[in-house]
Image (tube, rainbow, N blue to C red):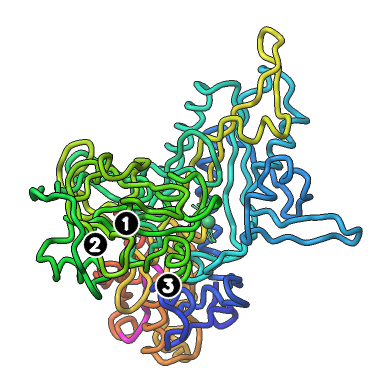
Amino acid sequence: MRWHRSLIPTLREDPAEAEAISHRLMVRAGLVRQLAAGIYVYLPAGLRVLDKVTAIIRQEMNAIGGQELTMPVLQPAEIWQQSGRWEAIGGEMFRLKDRNQRDMCLGMTHEEVVAWLAAREIRSYRDLPQVWYQIQTKERDEARPRSGVLRTREFLMKDSYTLDPDQVALDKSYNDHKGAYCRIFDRCGVRYVVVDSDPGMMGGSGSHEFMAPSAAGEDEVALCDSCGYAANVELARGVPAPAPAPAWTLREVATPEARTIAEVCALLGIEPALTIKSLVFVGAEGPVLALVRGDHALHERKLARALRGEARPAHAGEVHEQLGAPAGFVGPVKVSGVTRIVADESLRQGSYVAGANREGYHLTGVVAGRDFQCEWADLQAVLPGEACPSCGAALRVERVIEVGNIFKLGTKYSVPLGAVYLDEHGRERPIVMGSYGIGPARIAAAAVEQRHDADGIVWPWNIAPFQVHLIPVASREAVQAAAAEDIYRELVAAGFEVLLDDRDERAGVKFKDADLLGVPIRVTVGQGFVREGLVEIRERATRRERKVPRAEVLATLRTVAGEVAGG
Ligand code: ATP
Ligand code: MG
């Protein structure tokens, strides 16, 4: 490709609103432009990256028997009403009406369409298993579209669906996908960990997420370097150090103006691990009291799982009105006005300070089970340094980008949509489904997050927009321009993907743009060529340079490409 006829609008300055590194660099390198919040144009070089990622995905899906098809973005409400998700999904779904006032939506995922199709096309066990996939646009009205292409409202997804006769067969389809995903991320040059995850709104019996470590991530995982334990913090359970156990009796103490854990601890001269943090949430059935140890934080997803539904933090006014005491003084003993009390497992043992449900007072010596009854659940957000639940070593907590996930759906969609088959004995059975997603744009952005330096992107070989960036230092100089043209033809004929910077720009601009765009190998034709016949070959990642005679350019490039692609 010749730059002077291409649309690669690089920018010197960071875009004002961009926080994530990948967002800044992808806009500056001329890969994408934002049309509206979370809606992006992919410019030619950006599309080349996406196409490389999807080509890898396609190969790996085909290798496990995947059959590519494509399903509509525009969908009738009926199938979503049948699965129950028309009601269950909130503002994330784009809904609209057609000209006859029929409810429609834009597909955010395709389990319903797959189950609908399976209900019509699959008859007997002989038709199973099936692996169907598409690489297609999804529409989601994300609450916080941010971080460039990491979270957009319109995005490409490879989603695949497996149809199996039973759980054992599903396990095999699932493991095939797990292997394919690992190969996809390996080939795309993205570092990742595979973690246990919470199936959430997908439902089903098991799921894993593929997480790329990066500060720009919105998820956190707990990792054990000693035994390999890895889980989303939504599920991870560390073993906290036990709280000290003072010999307290249950009694009320005056704590005027001490509302926060820190204030109560300062007043009573105790550490936060000796207190109970009492938090009021509003769930579907009304106010709920959630309890964690004072030195711990509550994880809202864990609470939602314990309650089997979402809950929001109560406003200060609501707390006072419903429980009869201000937020800083509520506690589990003789509390009124809540429908449920859910406590974190770590409070089963020990004796604590908790709010007395009376303004200006706390109780010391509160013991769960004796002084109050509650439901037990895992509510606490795992902290770095807590003991690994499987081996006891210290856990690490790392920020990650979710780049893919896989779910065992079971019969959650096949039953309501009537996707059944006849088994060997002629009995009707529901098809057992799996569902598997991957975001090509997230893979690209995660690669940028993980591989960049102060000057720009450092693309992994397999997903780089070009393999070679060829620069005649002075395009107007006939000898340089002719040599560059000649090398361009030779490299293209040899199968390299080459960007020829034939713009009439200063050398500094060309070099800066080359570093920004991050093509793995730069080939420069400059004064060294005019004087000594030498061409410079430079690796973007290591900045290693070699100067070779014109005749050796192709052979040297093959060697360097082999090294760069392998490393
Ligand atoms: P998240 O928790 O980040 O919202 P999700 O669980 O909703 O992700 P899935 O519905 O399972 O994601 O989608 C599968 C894959 O599609 C994700 O792993 C991710 O790579 C990609 N993806 C999901 N939402 C977006 C988005 N808004 N923008 C870009 N890619 C996305
Ligand atoms: Mg989502």
Measured along the vertical axis of the image, is residue 152 above or below residue 292? below
Q: What number is the disc on residue 362? A: 2
Does the magenta segment cover residue 104?
no
- Residue 163 or 196: which is nearer the viewer? 196
Q: Could you tell which of marks 2 and 3 lies nearer the N-terminus?
A: 2
User: Disc 2 versus disc 3: distance between alpha carbons?
Assistant: 69 Å
> Please, what secondary structure does the residue beneath circle 1 have?
loop
Using the numbered discs, state the Cα–Cα distance from disc 1 to disc 3 in whole angstroms.
Answer: 65 Å
Q: Are discs 2 and 1 less than 8 Å apart at CB?
A: yes
Q: What amino acid type is highlighted by mark number 1?
A: Gly
Front-most of 187 and 145? 145
Q: Is residue 373 above or below residue 530?
A: above
Label drawn at residue 331: 1
- Residue furthest to the right: 100
User: Which residue type does callout 2 highlight?
Assistant: His
Q: Is 85 displayed left or right of 398 in the figure? A: right
Residue 152 percent location from the top left of the image: 55, 66
Residue 463 occupies quadrant: bottom left
Which residues fall within the magenta stretch?
519-527
Indicate whether 278 appears above or below 394.
below
Q: Is residue 57 visible?
A: yes
Dot 1 and dot 3 residues touching (CB under 8 Å): no
**Residue indicated by mark 3:** 469
